[in-house]
Image (spheres, helix red, strand yellow):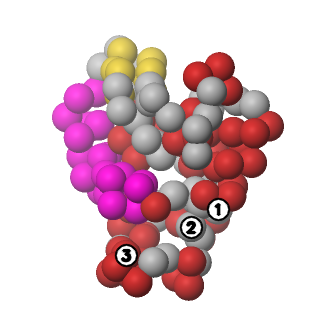
Amino acid sequence: MKVPATAWRTKEVERLAEQNAIRHKDELPDNMLKYWRFRHSLFTRFNEGILLDKESWFSVTPEALAYRTAVECQGDVVMDGFCGAGGNVIQFAMTCNHVLGIDIDPVKLEMARRNGEHSTVVF
C-alpha cells in the first residue's frame, strides 16, 4: 500500500484506514490471535470503533501505560514523533496543553485522528 506523501486527510487515506482496520477476532491472522484478548488494554473503548491495522496491534502502547507516561510528562508542549494509531498521543492530549503527533504513514495518522475521537481528542 503506497500512499503519496501529500495524501494526508484525503478520501483515499480515510478509505485505507477503514479498509486496513482489524476490528474482529476472525480478521486477525492466526499468529496474532493472542493480541485479541488484550484489545481492551490497548484501548478501553475498543468496541466503540477503534481502528488498528496489523502493525498497530502489536506496536500501540497499552492505554494504562500511555496514561502513566503522560502524567509523568505533563507540560506545555509534547511531540510524539512516531504516533502510529495514537495510543500515546491521545493520552498526552489529556495532560498537556499542546500535543503534536507525527508519523510517516498518513493512514496511521488517520487512525490516530479517528481513535482520538473516542477519547474527546481533536486532531
> Which residue position is annotated with label 1?
49
Q: Which mark is residue 27?
A: none
> Which tag, 2 or 1, sits closer to the chain's start?
2
* Near-viewer residue (47 or 3): 3
Residues at discs 2 and 1 in contact (Cβ within 8 Å): no
Instruction: Verify whether residue 60 appears in magenta.
Output: yes
Q: Position of residue 102 (x, y in %)?
A: 44, 25
Direction from residue 65 to residue 4 in the image, left or right: right
Q: Residue at x 26, y 37 (%)?
A: 71
- Give the residue displayed 29% in from the left and 37% down from the top: 70
- Look at the picture and state if 49 lies above or below 81: below
Pointer 3 or 2: first along the chain: 2
First along the sequence among labels 3 and 1:
3
Residue type for callout 3 = Met
Highlighted range, magenta: 55-74
Name the residue at 35% across, 21% down. Answer: 79
Residue 97 sits in quarter: top left
* Residue topped by disc 3: 32
**Residue 38 in sight from this viewpoint:** yes
